[in-house]
């Protein structure tokens, strides 16, 4: 799963851009993280066997597999990225182009308004950056799984 994700980053994301879905710290990273934990612990916990990502996050918290703080931050990041992607689709009129436009373009202003930031484009840019950074930080939750994979394959 981790190798597949690395391949996606290399092949599907144009350098120097922010892709809300496929970029480093984007929605796919959020989903892979949750799915990785579900796969790892789901055999012992039927509660984790759900295809709904938000239900999966709740189950991880209820089972004590993630902390309440991680739950809140992960849930907020997931919801924000979903909203961002939906807004990008509306602004662009294209369901496939999920690259965030540069902040100095009119298209970014439309995006900010669509997401309720009004003319405060800098606040939206800050939220995008901090959310994607938070998602990247969550990769630490997969460290025990990575260590197990290295021990069994190495």
Image: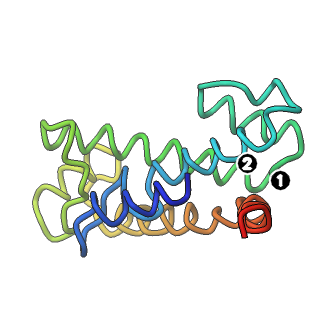
| Residue at the spot 67% in from the left edge and 29% down from the top edge | 55
The number of discs equals 2
Looking at the image, residue 32 lies above or below residue 101: above
The quadrant in which residue 125 appears is: bottom left
Q: Are circles 1 and 2 on residues that touch, CB within 8 Å?
A: yes
Q: Which of 14 and 86 is in front in this view?
A: 14
Label 1, label 2: how many angstroms apart (C-alpha)?
A: 6 Å
Tag 1's secondary structure? loop
Q: Residue 94 carries which label?
A: none
Q: Where is residue 120 in the image (x, y as percent from the top left)?
A: 30, 62
Q: Residue at x 79, y 67 (%)?
A: 151
Q: Residue at x 37, y 50 (%)?
A: 21
What is the crowding at mark 2: few (fewer than 14 residues within 10 Å), some, or many (at least 20)?
some
Q: In this view, does 46 lie to the left or right of 97?
A: right
Q: Residue 71 carries which label?
A: 2
Q: In the rendering, at what x and y percent does residue 42 appear?
A: 79, 34
Horizontally, is 143 left or right of 103 in the view? right
Could you tell me residue 138's position as x and y percent? Answer: 65, 62
Q: On the rendered structure, is 133 left or right of 150?
A: left
Residue 36, how many percent across, how many down? 66, 47
Residue furthest bottom in the image: 16
- Which residue is label 1 attached to? 67
Circle 2 — which element? helix
Pointer 1 local density, CA inside 10 Å: few below 14, some 14–19, many at least 20: few
| 112 up-or-down from 64: above or below | below
- Residue 99 lies in quadrant: bottom left
């Amino acid at each position: 799963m981790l190798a597949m994700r690395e391949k996606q980053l290399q092949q599907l994301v144009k350098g120097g851009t922010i892709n809300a879905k496929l970029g480093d710290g984007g929605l796919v990273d959020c989903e892979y993280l949750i799915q990785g934990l579900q796969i790892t612990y789901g055999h012992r916990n039927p509660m984790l066997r759900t295809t709904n990502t938000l239900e999966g996050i709740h189950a991880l918290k209820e089972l004590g597999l993630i902390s309440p703080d991680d739950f809140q931050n992960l849930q907020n990041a997931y919801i924000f990225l979903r909203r961002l992607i939906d807004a990008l689709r509306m602004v662009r009129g294209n369901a496939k182009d999920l690259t965030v436009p540069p902040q100095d373009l009119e298209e970014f202003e439309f995006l900010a308004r669509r997401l309720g930031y009004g003319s405060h484009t800098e606040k939206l840019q800050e939220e995008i950056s901090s959310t994607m950074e938070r998602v990247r930080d969550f990769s630490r939750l997969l460290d025990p799984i990575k260590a197990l994979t290295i021990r069994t394959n190495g």
